[in-house]
Image: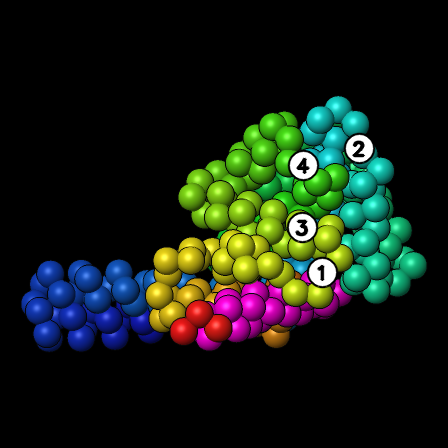
Amino acid sequence: MRWTGKLLGGVFGYMTFGTLGALLGVYIGHKFDTGLAQNPFDPERQQRTKKVFFKSTFAIMGHIAKADGQVSQEEIQMARRVMAQMELSAEMKNEAIAEFNRGKEQDFNLDVELNEFKQACQRHKNLVRMFIEVQLQAAFADGVLDAAEDKILLHICGRLGIPRFAYEQLKRMLGASQRRGSHQQTRSTPDEAYEILGVSKSSTDAEVKKAYRRLLSQHHPDKLVSKGLPDEMMKLAKEKTQQITEAYDTIQELRKKLK
């Protein structure tokens, strides 16, 4: 049992603020000790996070695809496209397909799956966000996010602690990304660029830059992998950062022309 943080925190708190400070110091020290005990750089913990992220991603993708009663050809193609982007080995591809099919089963327990995912990944908010983005991307595969899919995704966000407004923002951003892809464009339109960054035309240059930097940080491939994103999914994260950068460049070029 770790106690160094509690001891030092209590002593420092007492010397600074008396009894109340000691209590606060012990609490802060306890949080510090807990953080050490759950070292995020522990290789075994990181491997478990990667394994859970991988299996839950494809299982829940299959469950959402079946939400409207049948899995469309577009949704199957999206799942296969994600697998192709990840350049999975034959063995891992078979595992991903098996998980996708498991999620489609009638007895699939979504909440049990989410509890396991939450236990493994909840300490890494950007990892959870990436997970939701992948699920939204798959749900938009047929061009429409129907009510049944939307309901399940809202339930998932609730279980994982993602606020409704954050989910709605992700929906707008992913919807813009999907429209861009369906048009086979090399660059997003100005309207799509604003949606991808989650800002509006009335946002100041400083606000646009802040949103851009925040999104780049959230999707940084190396950071996500270090927190438990499976190595195979790094290409997805790189594509996200490329989309974000292109959207920012589109807005910058537009605003220069208007000045």
Q: Name the residue under label 2.
A: 71
Q: Nearer the viewer, mark 1 or mark 2?
A: 1
Q: Mark 4 points at which residue?
A: 144
The residue lying at 75 percent from left, 24 percent from top is: 69
Residue farthest left in this picture: 18
Q: Name the residue under label 3.
A: 178
Q: Nearer the viewer, mark 4 or mark 1?
A: 1
> What span is in magenta?
230-256
Q: Give the main secondary structure, helix, strand or loop, of the magenta stretch.
A: helix
Dot 1 falls on a residue whose secondary structure is loop
Q: Name the residue under label 1.
A: 185
Q: How far apart are marks 4 and 1 (CA)?
A: 19 Å
The answer to whether any part of residue 23 appears in the image is yes
Question: Front-most of 81 and 100?
Answer: 81
Q: Do the residues labelled 2 and 3 touch (CB within 8 Å)?
A: no
Q: In which quarter of the image is residue 221?
A: bottom right
